[in-house]
Amino acid sequence: MKSIEAFLTDTFLQAFEKCYGETPDSKILQIQKTKKEFTGDFTVNVFPFLKISKSKPEETATKMGTELTKSHEEIQDFNVIKGFLNLSFSDEFWIESLKKIAQKENFGYSEPQEETVLVEFSSPNTNKPLHLGHLRNIFLGDAVSNILRAAGKKVVRTQIINDRGIHICKSMVAFMEFDPEATPENTGKKGDHLVGDFYVKFDQEFKNQIRVLEEEGLSHDEAKEQAPIMMKARETLKKWEAGDPDTVALWEKMNSWVYAGFDVTYEALNIQFDKLYHESQTYLKGRDIVRDGVKNNLFYQKENGSTWVDLTDEGLDEKLLLRADGTAVYMTQDIGTAILRANDFPGLKSMVYTVGNEQDYHFQVLFKILAKLGYSWASDCYHLSYGMVELPDGKMKSREGNVVDADDLIRVMKENAKEQGVDRGNYEELSSTEREDLAKKVSLAALKYFILKVDPKKNMTFDPKESIDLNGDTGPFIQYTYARTASILQKAGGVNTDFTYSTPENYEREVIKQLYRFPEIIAEAAAKYNPASVARYCFETAKLYNTFYQNTPIFHASGENIIQQRVLLSAQVGKVLKTGMDLLGIEVPERF
RNA sequence: GGUCUCGUAGCUCAACCGGAUAGAGCAAUUGCCUUCUAAGCAAUAGGUUCCAGGUUCGAGUCCUGGCGGGAUCACCA
């Protein structure tokens, strides 16, 4: 199906050439939906063409409108307001569009291509449970993966698990110090929470020891250096790097608890990955690459032996790649991981990194370095940068304990969905398993939609009170609308496309117009890596359908053909809503 | 301080590349379940788009200068 943009661009430029003997650059052509206070379906702005037409806006628009309606039967009528040419498409055009939409099983999807895109998201540290900030990351990464796939790409979902380093050593030390017999089983704690609690204990003890040392007369920095528990953590890291069997065994045990805990959370969120990378397995790769880079004069060493890249020519800075002692930093590891991935997936076209915007600079540098190393895919890498999630009373600070834990949040949301379900009329008709299932779907929809509807680039405020709202611009509202279409379909006993179509009423036409835009919406969301436009589209679609539904009889319509047509329309709305929500990682229920 | 980014209705967010009278939801007020699911629909009210200049047929959008918030500028990750 050709998009309106493509169709109108061609026809308009041709018509313009015919009228004025010159073909303007297609870039200056602006096509938009006609605003609802005016008559028409699509609007062309003729202001940019006045230089060529050398006549008044109204004259140019009128001349173009006359020509377009004459030469194209799809364009039935037009009106002109100032420089705006409002075009109305024919009923037949919209009916044909509805038929075409109905024929496509995967309406909205592009043809599959060979290009592979790797999307990295989530990528937690293994020393604490997932929190609200991770959720934005996870939902974005998951949704963008879905959207890219819909746009025809082959997608590999991945994460890099930060399983190594001083942070996990801190948890290990605290474990040995305070409760070496603890297990998730005998404490009844989820593995990631158990390990996270040890990390907190470490920090508390660390602070105590600093205070004691300071009282003994040491400076703050000295106290930090000499606190026994911190010295133990550093020792542990050294032992780990040296491959000490006991240390490695403990590390493996505690990490396995964390993974088991994460798995439960991912499961609850319906999130899957295709391929995992562990920092412990990749951090050495980057070091070799950097050393080679020094030999090839891409990087340089300073007197103290540290290795740097000079990006001042690119408008950036000098950046450290290896410490003076030769150990790797964050950047080194990311270089190694990227190259490892490119080797693992030879058809790789690009990589998408879902990482918060506090690392904007890091990724600018990373991509420049990869380009410097000569990798062609470097220029197609994209940092899916997203803003912070703030709470109504300010930023989340783990130190102050006002972090919203992911598991808690999921549980509270579900309880709320159950409570609110009780007030509903048809709650009694559902079985208890249906109620459970619905509560899960509704609560996840509320959470995911609430986060995804905001433009990723922007900081957002997460108001718990607002997030559990199930009315208005929310995921559950869209689910509810889907269930309505499902209910219509069930009552009708299926869809039929073989009947005599009739002129759509205004409400119907608005819905068809909206459905027609779906492929463009997906393409735009993919091009901009922005699930928010899909979320907004779903909401608008649901809204338009509800308006139609509440103002137009379906089964009480005056004639079998009209009933069939409205059932068909309802089915298409359901299909599009289901697809759209699926792109956001949200399931839709058949009953509500 | 340098660099980047954001500032839109009481609140949370929209507004494609500069286009028409800046749109939704929540909260408030009011109607609609004797018809297909009322987590719905309809209506009212709510704005100097932070401020001051500039560019132009046209600026929430672009430029300059302020004011205010956030991020970043580690041999941390």
Image (cartoon, coloured by chain):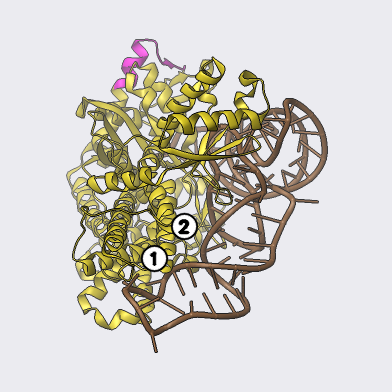
Whether residue A133 appears in this view of the structure is no
Amino acid type, mark 1:
Tyr
> Residues at badges 2 and 1 in contact (C-beta under 8 Å)?
no
Is residue A87 rendered to the left or right of residue A105? Answer: right
Query: A13 or A168: nearer the eye?
Result: A13
Up-down relation of residue A241 to residue A174 (above or below)? above
In the image, residue A204 lies at what x, y percent? 44, 60
> Which quadrant holds residue A265?
bottom left
Q: Residue at x 17, y 44 (%)?
A: A245
The quadrant of the rendering that contains the C terminus of chain A is: bottom left
Q: Residue at x 44, y 63 (%)?
A: A547
- In the rendered structure, does residue A301 fall within the stretch colored magenta? yes
Q: Residues within 10 Å of mark 1 (few under 14, many from 20)?
A: some
Real-space CA distance between mark 2 and mark 1, rounded to the nearest whole angstrom: 47 Å
Supply the letter of whichever chain is brown. B
Q: Nearer the viewer, mark 2 or mark 1?
A: 1
In the image, residue A110 lies at what x, y percent? 28, 36
- Specify whether disc 2 shares its chain with disc 1: yes
Whether residue A359 appears in this view of the structure is yes
**Which residues are the magenta region?**
A289-302
Colour displayed for chain A in the image of the structure: yellow
In the image, residue A219 lies at what x, y percent? 57, 47
- Given the image, what chain letter belongs to the residue carrying mark 1? A
Residue of label 1: A549
